[in-house]
Image (spheres, rainbow, N blue to C red):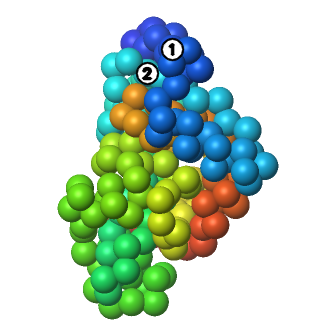
Amino acid sequence: MSTIRAIRRLTFVSSSESTHPNVAKVRAAAEAAGLTIEVRRFPEGTKTAQDAADAIGVTLGQIVKSLVFAVDGEVVLALVSGSNQLDEKKLALAAGGHKCARVDADIVRQATGFAIGGVPPFGHTTQLRVFVDPDLLQYDEVWAAAGTWNDNFGAAPDDIVRVAGGVVTDLKRAV
């Protein structure tokens, strides 16, 4: 771990001091499914996977990217390892569709209740089908957004799959 990562890792603030309503929704969804999470706030921001890995002090692969797409018009969620790029054709196939398209920020917020950069793997305002990159399962702990650009939580990947109701399937774009 680089010195910069070690220093950044120490800059988190306990989010229990002033819990954002989005964080409370994510925590409540986790608890309703029998999962207790500790949410950490990183003032420098964790909007991108690399920002999150640097702030938390973990590898890029341990970051869960929550990517919202439409497959044949149905909004779905792909949970992808931070070190991978999503193959949209594989997502469409996994969802039983043909065409996969990006959705705009308004649709992301409408479907999930969260802004891009803070979309968690569960706790959404609508029930979404969730597809999970199997590369996340190689880690003991992965980190996901907890409803804002600054708040994250760590959990076992199997717990995230379970609580999100996810289907593990190959989503990685070949390089």
In this view, 13 is above or below 73: above
Disc 1 residue type?
Val
**For residue 134, side relative to residue 95 (left or right):** right
Q: Which residue is mark 1?
A: 13
Sequence-first disc among 2 and 1: 1
Local crowd size for mark 2, using a 10 Å CA cut-off: few (<14), some (14–19), many (≥20): many
In this view, 172 is above or below 96: above
Q: Do residues under tags 2 and 1 come within 8 Å of each other at their CB atoms?
A: yes
Q: Position of residue 45 (x, y in %)?
A: 34, 26
Residue 112 position by quadrant: bottom left
Local crowd size for mark 1, using a 10 Å CA cut-off: few (<14), some (14–19), many (≥20): some
Q: Position of residue 165 (x, y in %)?
A: 64, 66
Residue 42: mark in rendering: 2
Q: The C terminus lies in which quarter of the figure?
A: bottom left
Q: Residue furthest right?
A: 34
Residue 28 position by quadrant: top right
Indicate the secondary structure of the residue bearing disc 1. Answer: strand
Q: Residue at x 31, y 48 (%)?
A: 116
Q: Residue at x 24, y 58 (%)?
A: 106
Disc 2 residue type?
Phe
Q: Residue at x 39, y 42 (%)?
A: 118
Mark 2 to mark 1 CA distance (whole Å): 6 Å
Q: Nearer the viewer, residue 41 or 135?
A: 41
In this view, 90 is above or below 155: below
Q: Residue at x 48, y 48 (%)?
A: 120
- Look at the image and tell me whether residue 138 can be seen: no
Indicate the secondary structure of the residue bearing disc 2. Answer: loop
Q: Nearer the viewer, residue 109 or 86?
A: 109
